[in-house]
């Protein structure tokens, strides 16, 4: 499971909680958001 946070400018950061804290698993912008999400779901 991962979470998404967005900036006002449209940047997205995807992260998950781990035993070591928060792990950043990806970055995107509006133009490639779905491609990044698809990649993260595939690697699950």
Image (tube, rainbow, N blue to C red):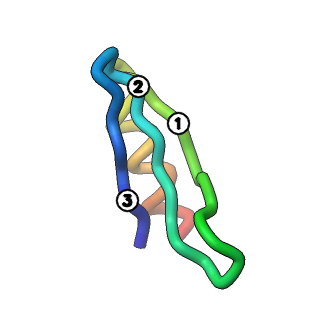
Mark sitting earlier along the chain (3/2): 3
Say few, some or many: other residues with alpha carbon within 10 Å of mark 3 (under 14 / 14 to 19 / 20 or more): few
Mark sitting earlier along the chain (1/2): 2
Q: How many numbered badges does the structure rendering display?
A: 3
> Which is nearer the eye, 18 or 31?
18
Is label 2 in a helix, a strand or a loop?
loop
Residue 16 screen position, x and y as percent: 51, 66
Residue 1 screen position, x and y as percent: 41, 73
User: Mark 3 and mark 1: span between their CA atoms?
Assistant: 11 Å
Is label 1 in a helix, a strand or a loop?
strand
Indicate whether 13 appears above or below 42: above
Is label 3 in a helix, a strand or a loop?
strand
Q: Which residue is mark 1?
A: 27
Q: Which mark is residue 11?
A: 2
Residue 39 screen position, x and y as percent: 50, 50
What residue lies at 52% left-to-right and 36% top-to-bottom? Answer: 27
> Which is nearer the eye, 17 or 37?
17
Quadrant of the rendered image containing residue 32 = top left
Relative placement, left or right, of 40 versus 5 is right
Q: Which mark is residue 3?
A: 3
User: Mark 3 and mark 2: span between their CA atoms?
Assistant: 14 Å
Residue 31 screen position, x and y as percent: 35, 19
């Amino acid at each position: 499971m991962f979470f998404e946070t967005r900036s006002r400018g449209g940047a997205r950061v995807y992260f998950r909680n781990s035993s070591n804290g928060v792990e950043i698993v990806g970055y995107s912008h509006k133009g490639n958001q779905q491609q990044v999400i698809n990649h993260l779901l595939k690697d699950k």
